[in-house]
Amino acid sequence: MTLPDHLTTDILIVGAGPAGLTAAATLAPRCDIEVLVLDREAAAGGIPRHSDHPGYGIRDLKTFISGPAYARRLTAKAVHAGAHIRTHTMVTGWTGPNTVEVTGPEGRQAITAQAIILATGARERPRTARLIPGDRPAGVYTSGQLQNLVHLHHRTPGTRAVIVGAELVSWSAAMTLREAKCRPVLMTSTHHRPESYAAFTLSGRLALHLPVATRTRVTRIIGHGRVSAVELENLDTGARRIVDCDTVVFTGDWIPDNELARAAGLEMDRHTRGPLVDSAQTTSRSGIFAIGNLTHPVDTADVAALDGRAVAEHALRYLSDHPTAASARQFRVLPGDNLRWLSPGRIDPAIAPPRNRILSWPTRQIRMPTVTIRQDGRTIARRHLSWPASPGRVFRIPVSLLAGASVEAGPVRVDIG
Ligand SMILES: Cc1cc2nc3c(=O)[nH]c(=O)nc-3n(C[C@H](O)[C@H](O)[C@H](O)COP(=O)(O)OP(=O)(O)OC[C@H]3O[C@@H](n4cnc5c(N)ncnc54)[C@H](O)[C@@H]3O)c2cc1C
């Protein structure tokens, strides 16, 4: 079948992961609007499609199911709501302010939409981007690549693996390795304690008999043809040792899939490295929204999904009012020294961000953090929060702490200590 050269729709969603599918399922039944979702993969569902372990759907679907089951359920909800989902279809660029160019099995096509929602997710940076020296053998993966190999292509990675990182996804990688009969022999973390929740780390260690080497970094990958070992360095003593393995999995170290946002010329947030969004998830270009891990790399799938639910209301308002610019009554929020990023990066005091939370990414572990909000040289709020902060997982800050900020007083700086 040949596609028409040009198609128009009311709302175009790029990315059929939890964020995009939930936005589609919320928007499609409303006011007879036409919603088209595009995804470059063979099937809708995003990362959960190949993350075959329980842990999905807690906050959005009030359930606890595996990634593939969650992906199927979100896809079914979007289709049932009346959204059209096209897979094998990649958005490659822009030919106008609200027109994208897509490439799929039937050829190329331009699609114009009244509003466009970018939900392209985030990926882990591969070994090359982390500048790890050594040989260039096979057997080196990110956890996403590993899960793709095992769950979608039913292949075996190797027999002995070292996992670099001790975040939540690192344990997900450990479970995948075990399922694929590849023994995880060591997990490493550059921090004093594993980045994952203590309960998670303890049960992971007990169930998988997997030691975690803290304050440790990989200094070299060794192997000709196939990985045969990694060289590790203790960051406190400088001592180095060789660990035999035929598989190395790099986990965490996320970067948003931001190419389309950049190609559109949207203002980027240099901290998240995704498009800068306000509390209505509007980017710097009116009518273009961004949600999910593209804007907070990375949170759990249910939080990405709830972004999708929240953006629906803002996209519908845009369709009915067509405001030409984002509200000027906003202030910028910037991370302090102990936070790598904050999302959303702009707050409109009249619009609550999804779940009334500002999401942030700590740069160090703080057991009992105090959040400090400063604007124009003075502290406007300080509050102790009862949940620990750790690099490798999102730290959530109630937006109510910013209630004393003024849109006239310049950027607000948020930090934890
Ligand atoms: C190993 C691992 C384990 C995890 N475990 C859990 C867990 O147990 N529980 C949990 O809640 N979360 C977990 N997560 C996190 C969860 O998977 C993500 O938070 C969630 O998938 C983010 O949803 P998203 O819609 O923002 O992005 P994604 O799921 O990444 O979806 C983005 C989609 O956009 C598509 N896309 C990108 N660019 C284009 C383009 N140009 N054209 C067309 N399509 C495009 C991609 O193909 C993809 O399908 C895990 C993640 C990983 C990597």
Image (cartoon, rainbow, N blue to C red):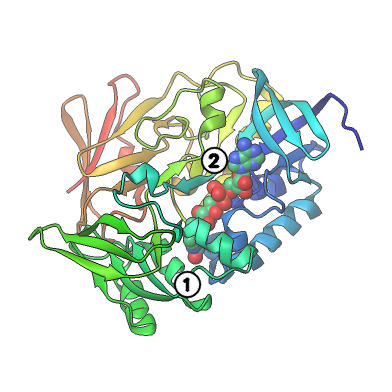
Image x and y of residue 184, in percent = 38, 74
Q: State which quadrant residue 105 falls in.
A: top right
Q: Given the image, on which type of amino acid does mark 2 rest?
A: Ile
Residue at 23% of width from left, 67% of height from top?
242
Residue identifier under label 1: 177
Point out the frontmost of discs 2 and 1. Answer: 1
Residue at 16% of width from left, 26% of height from top?
377
Question: From this viewpoint, which residue is outermost toward the front?
Answer: 224
Whether residue 191 is situated above or below residue 112 in the rendered picture: below
Q: Nearer the viewer, residue 328 or 391?
A: 391
Q: In what element is the residue under mark 2?
A: loop
Image x and y of residue 381, in percent = 22, 40
Q: Residues within 10 Å of mark 1 (few under 14, many from 20)?
A: many
Q: Residues within 10 Å of mark 2 (few under 14, many from 20)?
A: many
On whether ligand 1 comes within 8 Å of the CB at mark 2, the answer is yes
Residue identifier under label 2: 291
